């Protein structure tokens, strides 16, 4: 029995990091979701134990209530997240993977056609894997940050990204609350940054993406997704001083806050260094309260995305208005000044 379950775990591990079809993790097939959920549960239990009141009895029920508060999973806002989940979770990774894998190869070939072929470096295989993965890690994190930064700064992109911010409660499924148009441009923009960085590395090291790198990328996806689930779990987890390096779940809740002082803060994925460089860093320490939503005056009945249909359609109107703002009505003035009647007429 134990042996059987051990071999099940082993098979799952092999499936997750199988170098032959390493990108299988990008595709929804249920099994690989176990890793991000496991990360959520483990960190959730640690968070519960750390934050539990000393007088309170530690119980499984208490932990469940801490990790899965009913109001975050059972509300109008959460219900909309569930409805959008399948489309987004299927569609989202495909664009990113296609852009990265094909783009990196194409960019490397482009450099080779312009600057000539390189000779392979005299380096061990593991060093090539390490360099490729490190470049991928930094480029993926920066690409995600920079695209997200532009979404908050360019009104046209914000029209679509606002859908993610109109959630009034957070739960892991909110990770997938994305407008389909956002999925397309986000995948292409982030994928292009990664493809250029990785393509240059492939060219300089005269190598192609190794199975080892693809396997590490696969693990990275599971970890990044697990962190995303935590970020949207409503558990207030701060990393203290380590927030100068990493984005904590509490910092991402600040990102979702409707309060004006929190707007456009903490746009990073895993690393917070980009936020510090771009002046958008806001650590969890010192934040007393957050209110989730786009802004204070677009909550409840004023939320522009009260139904899934509205959350899919409304952004198109918003985006159109950004591209073609309505001209103000011309002010009409009388050409001839009004003649005042004499006071005793
Ligand atoms: Zn955002
Ligand atoms: Zn979010």
Image (spheres, helix red, strand yellow):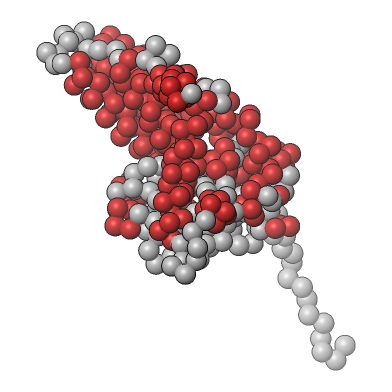
Q: Can residue 170 be seen at all in this image of the molecule?
A: no
Find the residue positioned furthest to the bottom: 344
Q: Is residue 328 left or right of residue 270?
A: right
Find the residue positioned furthest to the right: 345
- Measured from the top left, where is residue 154 in percent x and y? 50, 44
Q: Is residue 21 left or right of residue 234?
A: left
Q: Is residue 253 left or right of residue 201?
A: right
Q: Which is more toward the observer, 73 or 339?
A: 73
Q: As displayed, is residue 249 above or below residue 333?
A: above
- Measured from the top left, where is residue 216 in percent x and y? 33, 25
Q: Quadrant of residue 311?
A: top right
Find the residue positioned furthest to the front: 1
Q: Can residue 67 be seen at all in this image of the molecule?
A: yes
Q: Quadrant of residue 331?
A: bottom right
At 23% from the left and 25% from the top, the residue drawn is 130
Q: As displayed, is residue 229 above or below residue 106?
A: below
Q: As displayed, is residue 182 above or below residue 79?
A: above
At 42% from the left and 27% from the top, the residue drawn is 191
Q: Which is more toward the observer, 84 or 154?
A: 84
At 82% from the left and 82% from the top, the residue drawn is 341
At 49% from the left and 27% from the top, the residue drawn is 32
Q: As displayed, is residue 33 above or below residue 317?
A: above
- Measured from the top left, where is residue 263 in percent x and y? 49, 57
Q: Which is more toward the observer, 305 or 345?
A: 305
Find the residue positioned furthest to the left: 122
Question: In which quadrant is the C terminus drawn?
Answer: bottom right
How many labels were placed on the picture?
A: 0
- Measured from the top left, where is residue 70 in percent x and y? 64, 53
């Amino acid at each position: 029995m134990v042996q059987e379950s051990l071999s099940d775990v082993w098979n799952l591990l092999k499936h997750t990091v199988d170098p032959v079809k390493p990108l299988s993790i990008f595709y929804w097939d249920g099994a690989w979701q176990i890793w991000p959920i496991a990360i959520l549960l483990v960190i959730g239990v640690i968070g519960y134990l750390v934050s539990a009141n000393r007088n309170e009895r530690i119980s499984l029920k208490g932990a469940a209530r801490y990790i899965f508060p009913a109001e975050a999973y059972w509300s109008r806002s959460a219900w909309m997240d569930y409805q959008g989940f399948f489309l987004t979770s299927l569609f989202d990774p495909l664009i990113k993977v296609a852009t990265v894998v094909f783009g990196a190869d194409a960019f490397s070939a482009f450099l080779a056609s312009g600057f000539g072929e390189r000779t392979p470096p005299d380096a061990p295989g593991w060093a090539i894997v390490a360099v490729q993965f490190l470049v991928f890690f930094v480029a993926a994190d920066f690409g995600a940050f920079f695209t997200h930064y532009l979404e908050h700064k360019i009104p046209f992109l914000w029209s679509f990204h606002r859908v993610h911010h109109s959630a009034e409660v957070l739960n892991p499924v909110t990770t997938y609350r994305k407008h389909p148009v956002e999925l397309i441009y986000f995948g292409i923009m982030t994928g292009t940054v990664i493809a250029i960085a990785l393509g240059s590395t492939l060219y300089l090291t005269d190598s192609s993406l190794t199975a080892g790198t693809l396997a590490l990328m696969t693990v990275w996806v599971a970890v990044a997704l697990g962190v995303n689930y935590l970020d949207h779990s409503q558990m207030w987890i701060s990393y203290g001083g380590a927030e100068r390096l990493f984005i904590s779940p509490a910092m991402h809740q600040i990102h979702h806050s409707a309060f004006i002082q929190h707007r456009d803060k903490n746009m990073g994925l895993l690393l917070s260094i980009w936020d510090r460089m771009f002046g958008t860093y806001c650590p969890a320490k010192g934040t007393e309260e957050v209110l989730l939503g786009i802004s204070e005056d677009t909550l409840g009945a004023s939320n522009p995305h009260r139904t899934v249909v509205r959350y899919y359609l409304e952004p198109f109107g918003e985006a159109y208005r950004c591209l073609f703002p309505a001209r103000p009505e011309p002010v009409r003035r009388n050409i001839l000044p009004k003649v005042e009647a004499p006071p005793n007429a």
